[in-house]
Image (cartoon, rainbow, N blue to C red):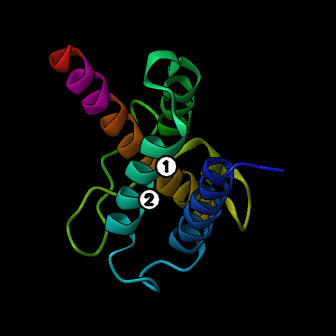
Amino acid sequence: MPSSRDTAGRILVALAAILALLRGFAPEVVPMDTLLLIVVGIAYAAVKVDVEDATGFLVLAIAVGVASRREPGWSNAMDEHGHASHAHGVLTHIPYIGEGLTGTLGGLGIFLYAGVAAVSAIWVFKRLKG
């Protein structure tokens, strides 16, 4: 039988996946989706990530973040609001669904980077506490 931490972790990952998919394929449907992904990422890290052995989590965050970023040397495209466009990740080259997949990876990157910040803060707090 899974523990309550396992169940909470699965629920948080499912919520992050749903929010990231909506962010990628139906942008602006969920208001404040970035803030929600940050809160879910912090909660996930606090519940599931062992700060003393977080290497796998940190590597995953880096890999997802890099995959969702613009490729070096590409033009600095701007969206209609004058913000840098992140729709030039590596998955953008897939016909029909590439931009949605890149947006989804971007959402997962937000979730994971928020978790990295939480893991870092918890690690520092534990070191200061003694």
Q: Looking at numbered disc 2 in the image, what kind of residue is underneath it?
A: Val
Q: Main secondary structure of the magenta part?
A: helix
Mark number, residue 40: 2
Q: Going 53% across and 69% down the picture, which residue do you hit?
A: 19
> In front here: 14 or 53?
53
**The C terminus lies in quadrant:** top left
Q: Is residue 119 left or right of residue 83?
A: right
Say above or below: 21 vs 66.
below
The residue carrying pointer 1 sits among few (fewer than 14), some (14 to 19) or many (20 or more) residues within 10 Å by Cα, namely: many
Q: Looking at numbered disc 1 in the image, what kind of residue is underneath it?
A: Tyr
Residue 55: horizontal and vertical position, in percent? Answer: 52, 18
The residue carrying pointer 2 sits among few (fewer than 14), some (14 to 19) or many (20 or more) residues within 10 Å by Cα, namely: many
Q: Is residue 80 left or right of residue 116?
A: left
Instruction: Give the image quarter of residue 85.
Output: bottom left
Residue 56: horizontal and vertical position, in percent? Answer: 59, 22
Q: Going 43% across and 24% down the picture, which residue do you hit?
A: 51
Say above or below: 96 vs 57.
below
Q: Is residue 69 visible?
A: no
> In front here: 29 or 51?
51
Instruction: Give the image quarter of residue 129.
Output: top left
User: Circle 1 sits on which residue?
Assistant: 44
Instruction: For mark 2, give the secondary structure.
Output: helix
Magenta part of the protein: which range?
Answer: 120-126
